[in-house]
Image (tube, grey):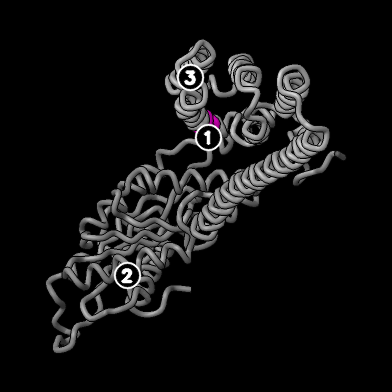
Amino acid sequence: MTPSAVDGHELNWQAEFRDSALEALFQRTLLSYHACQLRLALGVIAALLLAFSLADYNLLGPGEAFLTLLAMRLMIVAVCLLLALAVWQRPAVAQWQLPINLVCLLGLSGLLLVIPLRPESSGIHVASIVVASMALYLFIPSRLPWMLAGNAYLFLGFVMSAMLWAPLPPGLMLTSLLLLLFVNLLGFVTITRIKRLKREQFALLLEERSANRRLKIEIRERAALETRLRHMACIDGLTGIANRRHFFELAEQELRRARRDGTPLAICMVDVDLFKQLNDRHGHAVGDLVLSSVASCCQSVLRESDVLGRYGGEEFVIALPLADLATAAAIGERLRDRVRALKLPVLGDETSLTVTVGISRVEEGESRLDHALLRADRALYAGKAQGRNCVVVASRPQQPGHSSADPPAWASSMMARCMNPPDGGVAPSEAGSLAPASAGEPPP
């Protein structure tokens, strides 16, 4: 038989994998099946031998021939039951060649020894040999060479026994031999076909498992890629904080929560002072380091519930849930002090970092962040005009029913705490003075 290929795995003439490791894996997967099949076959053989003992008694009577035949059958039954018990306790015995072949040899020898003890039952002997030949192919889990060897022993033993103890007519002898040859050919084709089909199924199963593993790996890679893409779409690559789009998504969630619960929500605009001059003087690499450092300072002073994002360029924006203007101003002062105390070796001692912070609050009735951001931005420009390095709280919008000549009680919250700017710009006349952020257009 020519070797065939099953999904890239070649088979030899025995319809087994040429790859010994793959064949061993296949045998291990069929271990339970072979053990169950062998136990069933041994039990059936033992039952048939005991049943034939009753037939022997009817044919031979209680004589020496019957006792000899009975002792032989009982010995084979005992060996079959012992092997079945061993396979039950240890299924790996079902694939051991030596005990299986010894039991087969003993059973075939017992079947052949029946011929001289009952020479007159030639038809029964032929039928028994045919059944035993088919059983070797179909029910005994042994390799194909051992099957062929067992059938050759059975064929030659039948011929010799028929010639010595139970001569058959020439026509019946020829018919019996042709029948045995046909049975062996049929058994060989059947067992090779069955083995090939089983290995095709096993190869397909391996291919399916391999495809499933590749699919799982691809799914994990796609999930990791999706996570990286989502991270890239939501996080600013330089500072590691939320980008502008993702900040507004988070801030809108906080706005809806604040309107639902009736809690305050403050907005802070943070700008790095004189960043363009610093960037032009020291280079873009130092500018990137400054932005990352300022972002780290912002994260260090904020609460876990606060939302920090990069608004664009050197500007940062912060949403402070559950924070009124006083709380937001305190957080802004901590941030300003933290940035001012920041020392970067690449800048030297003569250059210090400062930020200007503009603060506003989302008022009642405002369903969007635009107005609060605009007020915080105007407060930020007011702080720039006052000399930078300060925190400016924007004035709240005029409520209906109030006269401009009658300022509300919260007007004192418009406060800008300014320090002398590092670049020698114009500073306010007195540190800590009140500086209202104009509600009109930002200063030029």
- As measured in the structure, the alpha-carbon distance from the residue carrying label 3 to the one carrying label 1 is 23 Å
Number of numbered discs visible in the structure rendering = 3
Which residue is depicted at the point 29% across and 79% down? 367
Residue 344 seen in this snapshot: yes
Of callouts 3 and 1, the N-terminal one: 1
User: First in sequence: mark 2 or mark 3?
Assistant: 3
Q: Nearer the viewer, mark 2 or mark 3?
A: 3
Residue 33 disc label: 1
Residue, disc 3: 77
Tell me where the magenta segment starts and ends, as one range.
32-38
Between disc 3 and disc 1, the foreground one is 3
Q: Residue at 12% x, 72% y: name it.
A: 409
Residue identified by numbered label 2: 437
At 65% from the left and 23% from the top, the residue drawn is: 119
Label 2 to label 3, Cα distance in Å? 108 Å
Please say if 390 is above or below 373.
above
Give residue 99's quadrant in the image.
Answer: top right
Residue 283 on the magenta segment: no
Q: Position of residue 402 (x, y in %)?
A: 15, 86
Q: Nearer the viewer, residue 98 or 204?
A: 98
Q: Quadrant of residue 105?
A: top right
